[in-house]
Amino acid sequence: LLNWTPSRLQQEGIMMDRLSGRTQGSFLGKNVLVMNVLGQDLPYHKFGSGDLVTLCRGHPMHENTFDAMVLDRGRFELRLVIDKVPAGLSQGLWRADQGTNVTSYLRSANAMRSLYKSSVSTQGGQQGQQFGQSLNGSA
């Protein structure tokens, strides 16, 4: 964010700007936001379901930000889930920066836990305990 220009971030598909926003109900108790570029296809981007997104009006390092997660995406819109709807969402334009994918992280963490558990039960625990310690950072 500090070294690349907004143009470069857009070319890499990790930032979209000039987005308009509105609310569209809720999903699992969280508010759903619909972000789009007025009457146009969304620009090229790598945003996908489960990605964390930072929303702001200008630059996320210099302004108030709001954290959301990508629910889904379409040709014309990006749907996000967020705890609290930002004030003035439907007024003015927004910028969205892609963060990490929470879904992939949780799946990987669960797979590692599963491997640890099966290693403990099949190898008498010694190697499994060492593996588990390295996962917890206490090798």
Image (cartoon, rainbow, N blue to C red):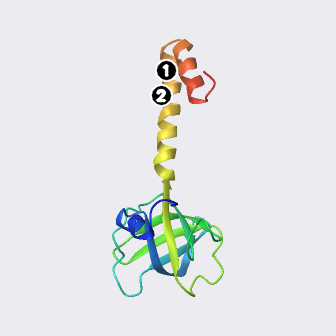
Secondary structure of residue under mark 1 = helix
- Vertical relation: 106 (above or below) 123: below
Residue sitting nearer the eye, 28 or 15: 15
Q: Kindly identify the amino acid type of the residue bearing the numbered disc 1.
A: Ser
Secondary structure of residue under mark 2 = helix
Q: Residues within 10 Å of mark 2 (few under 14, many from 20)?
A: some
Residue at position x 46%, y 75% in the image: 17
| Residue 76 spot, x, y in % from top left | 37, 78
Contact between labelled residues 2 and 1, with CB atoms less than 8 Å apart: yes
Q: Residue 68's image quarter? A: bottom right
Q: Residue furthest front?
A: 3
Residue at position x 51%, y 38% in the image: 110
Which residue in the protein does label 1 denote?
A: 119
Residue sitting nearer the eye, 119 or 80: 80
Q: Residue 83's image quarter? A: bottom right
Q: Which mark is residue 65?
A: none
| Badge count | 2
